[in-house]
């Protein structure tokens, strides 16, 4: 079975541009979460979506937005890119959204570089 | 507030040595889960273990073992007879329980482990 897939693998943008990152969850999983991992740090939670609804948001500015589609795939959008947005963006999927015992499976990530 | 601290930024050992990675967490919840993930250079987070707050039994899986002590809020990870393939960044993470709301993992800063031949 395919794991979590993310596209693109790498992306280079310039300041002020916007970017869209895509994630396809494991088949049967209905929840997708997004994390940002800046070089040398641990991943930080950005969003969780379940059944196409936002279930949680981390401490990120409104420039960050996301959505989930009927097939449970997801997009993360970042507007007005800043140099500090350069990071590895990880997507994780899980079967449902609630509870701490809900194992999340991570994709390979999209490495975004903002020049 | 939830917090995970991995005080060891980098560890370097020679192959076949044992190595312990430390993890200390803070939470106000009585129900929570602790995780360890491995991140090789490819970037993907690889799940290693999950432990719930009610189960303080230590766990061993091959060369890996985990020591969970609620009294000291620690969840340490030991690799016995380390191998070069164990070289990676290791993250400890905490997940708190909450109903139908979001589930999020709070990660530590990570420990970069280098096993030298």
Image (spheres, coloured by chain):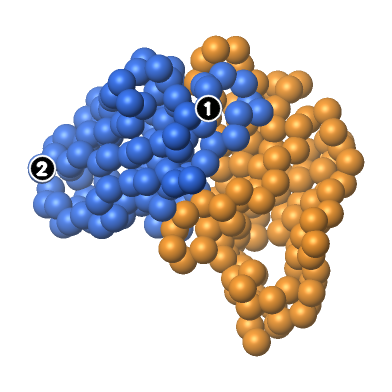
Residue at coordinates 51% horizontally, 31% vertically from top-left?
Answer: A94
Which of the numbered marks, if any, corresponds to residue A95? 1
Q: Position of residue B71 (x, y in %)?
A: 86, 36
Farthest residue, direction top: B100
Vertical position of residue A55 compared to residue A18: above or below: above
Residue at coordinates 45% horizontally, 26% vertically from top-left?
Answer: A31
Q: Position of residue A85 (x, y in %)?
A: 27, 46
Q: Which chain is blue?
A: A
Q: Position of residue B108 (x, y in %)?
A: 58, 46
Q: Position of residue A79 (x, y in %)?
A: 16, 35
Q: Which chain is orange?
A: B
Give the residue pinned by disc 2. Answer: A16
Q: Are marks 1 and 2 on the same chain?
A: yes
Which chain letter goes with mark 1?
Answer: A
- Real-space Cα separation, disc 1 to disc 2, in angstroms: 35 Å
Whether residue B5 can be seen here? no
Circle 2: is it few (<14), some (14-19), or many (20+) Cα within 10 Å?
Answer: some
For label 2, the SS is loop
């Amino acid at each position: 079975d395919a794991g979590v897939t993310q596209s693109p693998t790498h992306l280079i943008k310039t300041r002020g541009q916007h970017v869209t990152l895509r994630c396809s969850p494991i088949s049967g999983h209905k929840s997708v979460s997004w994390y940002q991992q800046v070089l040398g740090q641990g991943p930080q939670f950005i969003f969780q979506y379940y059944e196409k609804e936002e279930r949680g948001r981390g401490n990120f500015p409104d420039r960050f937005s996301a959505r989930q589609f009927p097939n449970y795939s997801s997009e993360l959008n970042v507007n007005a890119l800043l140099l500090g947005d350069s990071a590895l963006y990880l997507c994780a999927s899980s079967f449902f959204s609630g509870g701490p015992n809900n194992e999340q499976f991570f994709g390979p990530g999209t490495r975004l570089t903002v020049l | 507030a939830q917090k995970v601290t991995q005080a060891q930024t980098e560890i370097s050992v020679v192959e076949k040595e044992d190595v312990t990675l430390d993890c200390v967490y803070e939470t106000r919840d009585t129900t929570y889960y602790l995780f360890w993930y491995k991140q090789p250079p490819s970037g993907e987070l690889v799940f290693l273990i999950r432990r719930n707050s009610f189960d303080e039994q230590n766990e061993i899986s091959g060369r890996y073992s985990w020591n969970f002590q609620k009294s000291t809020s620690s969840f340490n990870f030991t690799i016995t007879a380390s191998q070069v393939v164990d070289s990676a960044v290791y993250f400890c993470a905490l997940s708190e329980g909450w109903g139908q709301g979001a589930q999020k993992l709070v990660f530590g800063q990570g420990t970069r482990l280098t096993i030298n031949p």
